[in-house]
Amino acid sequence: MTQRTIRRGWTAALALASLGALTACGGGTTGGDAVPEPEDGAASGSVTMWTYPVIADEAAHKKFWDEKIAEFTKENPDVDVNVEIYPWAGRDETLATAIAGNKGPDVVYLIPDQLPKYAKSLAAVDNFVTDQSAGLRENAKAAVTIDDAMLGSPLIMNSKPLVCNAAAFDAIGESGNYPATWDDLMALAPEFKDAGYDVTNYWGAVDATLNESFYPLLWQAGGSVFTEDGTGVAFDSPEGVEALQFITDLAEGGYVEKDLLTTIPAFEQTRTAQGKIACTWQQGPADVASFWGEDNVVVLPSLKEAKSIGYGTVGSLSLMKGSDDLDAAGKWLAFATSDEVSAEYAQASGWFGPYSDQTGLYEGDKTMTALEDTLDATTSGDLNEKSREVMGVLAPEIQAALIGEKTPEQALEDAAAAAAPLLG
């Protein structure tokens, strides 16, 4: 891994990301009812795009989009494009207020869990990206699709697979014996505990996102958060119980850091940062490289139970159907999310491209190459308008099981009962 890789990190887009979609379920959301057709010839009009600090260096970010605007306007000289970079903090409130006041942008950067929230204000982009969408990774396209309509055009994506600490495995005489399954991890747990290590970490505090902690286990067991039609929850299934029992067994065995089950301490204070951990699916390589040492970071496929799958998110550009110059906005969106522009943006931001031919973006960087290899085995979860609300009632019940107050079965049953009114 290079120093450049370490500096990239997982930007606020990942830290703030919640639920998205592998198999999109509407959950009562009406999306894509506006499906505009591109007009023949060059576009004309004015386009304002809102985005966020995906490229951490503000000057570099602005320069990137200034250059792309110049390229686009060579072919569309009558279009005035303005890209505005807003802070991550408060972005939903700012956007919602702007939409309510008819002052929203024409194009906006959204992640999967935001799409159902804004679906009624979005136009489907399918007709603008018909040619390029055929080259998208299947999970990237699904992550922006509601009711068979693309409510965004994927621009970048990333992955949170399994990351293991080579030094910890060396310390217990298990060099290279990395886990591939839940059973593998559990079998190693006592050996690591005896040597003073945790086999993994688990962030169980109620305000920690479940899509990086519990949901990957639920998906690996073959379960899902919502029913297929999105009108009910499905996490209280046998697969859900199996997933919660697995992490409860790790907690009861003393194989994970106890404090993380109820609090979110500063990362540098955790045993993960101290190198006293074997593997994690909740931290990316850049999160741990400076603590473990670059050469000790090993990127692996996500753990497997019924299947091997991990969390990943997709950054997309969406089209506001209230745009005064919808044709110009749609054509700019298509250009800005094209294969070529996407690849450049991915490399500039330390993310990955959503197109299946975008491989080798980080040739020579073994860590980033290994991450790239895991992209197709990721999901953002179920697209549902109530994703965050459901997470809010599920998280405390999971914590109750982890600290021994409830059985996994009772915890998930109680969470399902609390979630039912949210879904009507």
Image (cartoon, rainbow, N blue to C red):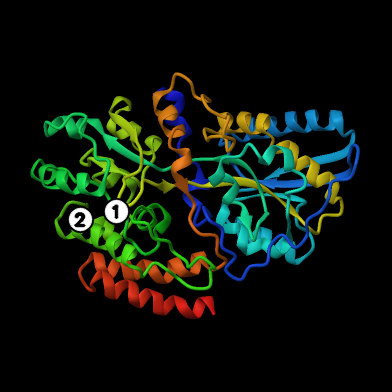
Disc 2 marks which residue?
250
Nearer to the camera, 34 or 93:
34
**Mark 2 touches mark 1? (CB < 8 Å):** yes
Residue occupying the point 45% across, 45% down: 378
Residue occupying the point 40% across, 24% down: 366
Query: Is the residue marked by circle 1 packed among few (<14), some (14-19), or many (20+) residues within 10 Å?
Result: many
Is 105 left, or right, of 254 in this rendering? right
Answer whether residue 287 is visible to the viewer in this image. Answer: yes
Gap between marks 2 and 1, in whole Å?
9 Å
Which element type, helix, strand or loop, lies under badge 1?
loop
Nearer to the camera, 207 or 312:
312
Please state the total of marks drawn on the protein image: 2
Answer whether residue 262 is visible to the viewer in this image. Answer: no
Res. 202 mark: 1
Residue 320 is drawn in which quadrant? bottom right
Residue occupying the point 39% across, 58% down: 208
Eyeballing the image, is 304 above or below 251? above
Nearer to the camera, 155 or 60:
155
Which element type, helix, strand or loop, lies under badge 2?
helix
Residue 250 is drawn in which quadrant? bottom left
